[in-house]
Image: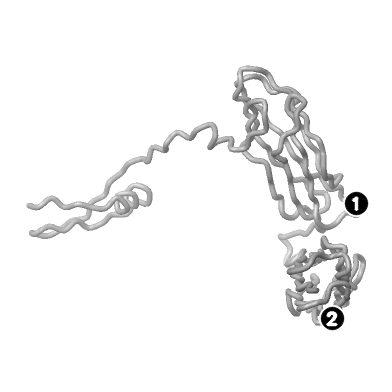
Amino acid sequence: YEIPTITFETLKSMILYGASPEILADRGGDFVKIDGNVIPRQRSVEELYPFEIGGGLRLDSNFHAFSYIGRGEQAQTTIVVYNTSDKDATLNLKPSKQSGLLRIDAPKVIKAQSLNKITLTYDIAPDSKRYGMLDDVYTAVVNGTESKTLISTHAIAIDKFDTAIDDTSAPSCELSKNFIKFGDVKHGESATNSEVELINDSEGELIVRAVEWKSKALKCSLKAGDTIKAGEKRKVTFSLETKGTDYGVWVDRVSIITNSPERPMISIRVTAIVED
């Protein structure tokens, strides 16, 4: 008989997924099953801890996004620190941006050729009035020298919802459109747009918890504390003042946090072209 052959991809499918291809020859065929284990290649230190912060210290990550965190809830993650050098190294985390809700537990000294960890915890009190984006950024200071590698976290503070309860009277939050285009705007002039509507198509009252964006050139008529009654909608007006903006494409994003369990946060992309 001729010796049948298979491709590497077929062999991989047989081992990883238990696939059983049929092997055919001149006088018929049969199904063949191969059992085995894939032995992974040993990963290097640089692959396991890709972020170098100086003094022989390396991190397995330098950013973590926690997504939503409700009232009375806590979210935690860890960053592994590896000292690859033969000397102990001191570590200090210097804040450059703080939400006030992040707690950091980090070792002051990392022993030579050893592992340690940084624990990052967001803890939102049940009676907290804070809603919206939580951003924290820290600079690692190793042996007294600031690293160029930053450690940062992101979370979104919302109401606490009981997901086990299907509340048909819970408020809903929808946008008539999720983008605003101011188009061409002369530098130094202003533009206004009221095309977007915030819709509450439910039996419960919708409460706006926070409205956030980055650029000082943008203004929005919607604000924290605004309410929309069941079955109603409201026009949202955006104003752009280009006096302090750069020329060219201008982009921002407005985030709206509400008490809607289904969609606690929605966002609108806002664009313009600032010309001379």
Asked whether residue 200 is in view, the answer is no
Image position, residue 180 (x, y; %): 76, 76
Q: Is residue 16 left or right of residue 206?
A: left
Image position, residue 150 (x, y; %): 72, 41
Q: Is residue 224 left or right of residue 52?
A: right
Is 244 or 14 nearer to us in this picture? 244
Mark 2 residue crowding within 10 angstroms, few (<14) / some (14–19) / many (20+): few
Q: Indicate the amino acid at tag 1.
A: Asp
Q: Which mark is residue 177?
A: none
Q: Which residue is mark 1?
A: 127
Q: Which mark is residue 194?
A: 2
Asked whether residue 171 is in view, the answer is yes
Q: What is the quadrant of the C terminus in the image?
A: bottom right
Structure colour scheme: one colour
Is 108 or 125 nearer to us in this picture? 108
Name which quarter of the figure residue 207 lies in: bottom right
| Residue found 58% across the figure and 35% down from its top | 49
Name which quarter of the figure residue 230 lies in: bottom right
Q: Is residue 187 left or right of residue 145?
A: right
Q: Indicate the amino acid at tag 2.
A: Ser
Decide: is 30 above or below 201: above
Is 248 or 203 nearer to us in this picture? 248
Report how far apart the C-alphas of labels 1 and 2 lie in the structure: 35 Å
Is 74 or 65 nearer to us in this picture? 65
| Residue found 7% across the figure and 52% down from its top | 1
| Residue found 53% across the figure and 37% down from its top | 47
| Residue found 54% across the figure and 31% down from its top | 45
Decide: is 19 above or below 111: below
Name which quarter of the figure residue 104 lies in: top right
